[in-house]
Every structure is written in C-alpha cells, then in structure tokens.
Image: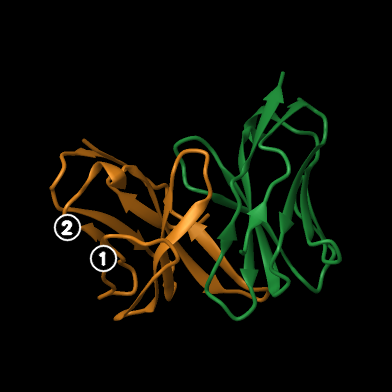
Chain colours: A orange, B green
Amino acid sequence: EADIYQTPRYLVIGTGKKITLECSQTMGHDKMYWYQQDPGMELHLIHYSYGVNSTEKGDLSSESTVSRIRTEHFPLTLESARPSHTSQYLCASSEYSVYQETQYFGPGTRLLVL
Amino acid sequence: GESVGLHLPTLSVQEGDNSIINCAYSNSASDYFIWYKQESGKGPQFIIDIRSNMDKRQGQRVTVLLNKTVKHLSLQIAATQPGDSAVYFCAENPSGTYKYIFGTGTRLKVLA
C-alpha cells in the first residue's frame, strides 16, 4: 500500500480566499502529480514535478500554483478561490519499476468554494 | 484527440459472477496501461498493470487483457464480491511521456 497523504480531506471556503492543499509521500518518489477530478469524471492533470525545484503545468489550465522544495512534499496553492474551483483534487507520486512507472494516489481533497 | 474511452458507464453483476470491464485507447504510442479502482470518497487505487509487450497479466482474482491490434484493454474480475463495487478507470501511458491518460470510468455494481 502506498504512503501518500493529503490534507485537508474536505474544505469549504469562501470566494477570494487563499488556500493550500497539502500532499506528502514517504516513499522517496521523485515524481509527483496533481489531478483535478469532477464527480464521475476522468482525471485531468494540472501540475507535475520530476523532482526538487522542478514543476510543470499539466494539460488542464489551472489557476493554481505548486512548489517542490522537498522530495516528499508537493503543496498546491490557490491564491484566490472561486466557485469554479470546486472539485476533487488528487495527488499522486510514482516510481520507476521493472515494468514502468506506477502511480500511487492519495485519498484526495474535496474542495467546495462558496 | 487522445482519449481513453470506456464502453459502458455502469455494469451490474451478480455476486459470485465474473465481471468484465472494457476500455478502448486511441494512442498507438501507449506502451503501459494501468487499471485503477476508485471507491466513493477515496483516491484511485492501483489494481494491475500491463506493458505492451504482454497480452495478458494475472493478479489475485483479476486479469488484464491487452489487444494492441484493436487498441482494447479489459479487466476481468473473478467471483465478484460486494467489496468490488467501485468505479474502475483504465489509464494509458504513451511511451516516453509523463502523461497518464484516464477515461471517464465504469461503475461496477455488485448485486447480492
């Protein structure tokens, strides 16, 4: 079982507030990812990181930012939350295995912006 | 564009029966595939993976089949149990990229 954690699990916040979603993994994985997922829908990649001080935007345009100062930590920040940001945010990390890189996911943060 | 599609959005099966969940992919450069299980309120959980140099891979009660000719992937669950009820996603990884392309998922309902 993967050791990847996200906090908070649930967050209700007002429009305009700044929020940071936390993600940590204890597996020493170099690669980490943030996905956005609406209920019953596919996952959309919004940010990823190959390692410390390496971050890139994903396929889905996002108003969020990320940082990777430590290998185990990959927080996502929304400077000014809006109702359109309401969604589930999933963090993942991956390692290189014999076959290929396998992604492991955290439990997710459900965000509701009022 | 690139897409990973699932044929059936919802699959209902009787407890004890076998389940087959299908997935089509469109990127011929994809050489690695993963099946995930996502229960309500949780993140996706890795089930099984397969590389493009294989046609079949088996795990505990699960089998993944890959048909590269028609770009089709399937997940077979033997003796389906109530705990198997969840949404199942397939994901493809095009060779040499960081990307995992996910489909919309199939909801599996196990009937008692």
Q: Which chain carries label 2?
A: A
Q: Residue at x 80, y 28 (%)?
A: B16
In the image, is B39 to the left or to the right of A84? right
Q: Do labels 1 and 2 share a chain?
A: yes
Quadrant hosting residue B107: top right
User: Looking at the image, is A110 positioned above or below residue A105?
Assistant: above
Query: Percent from the top left, x then y, of residue B39?
Result: 54, 38
How many labels, in total? 2
Q: Which chain carries label 1?
A: A
Characterize the local packing of mark 1: few (<14), some (14-19) or many (20 or more) Cα atoms within 10 angstroms.
Answer: some
Quadrant hosting residue B92: bottom right
Quadrant hosting residue B61: top right
Characterize the local packing of mark 2: few (<14), some (14-19) or many (20 or more) Cα atoms within 10 angstroms.
Answer: some
C-alpha distance separating marks 1 and 2: 8 Å
B32 and B23: which one is in front? B23
Quadrant for the C terminus of chain A, please.
top left
Query: Percent from the top left, x then y, of residue B30?
Result: 68, 71
Image disc number at residue A65 = 1
Query: Percent from the top left, x then y, of residue B84?
Result: 66, 35
In the displayed orientation, state which residue is furthest to the left: A17
Residue type at mark 1: give it.
Answer: Thr
In the image, is B59 to the left or to the right of A88? right
Q: Of helix, strand and loop, which one carries label 1?
A: strand
Tag 1 and tag 2, C-beta contact below 8 Å: yes
Q: Residue at x 31, y 42 (%)?
A: A86
The residue wearing badge 2 is: A79
Query: Percent from the top left, x then y, of residue B56?
Result: 84, 61
User: Looking at the image, is B40 positioned above or below residue A16?
Assistant: above
Residue type at mark 2: give it.
Answer: Glu
Q: Residue at x 77, y 71 (%)?
A: B52
Q: Which is more N-terminal, label 2 or label 1?
A: 1
Q: Residue at x 37, y 62 (%)?
A: A61
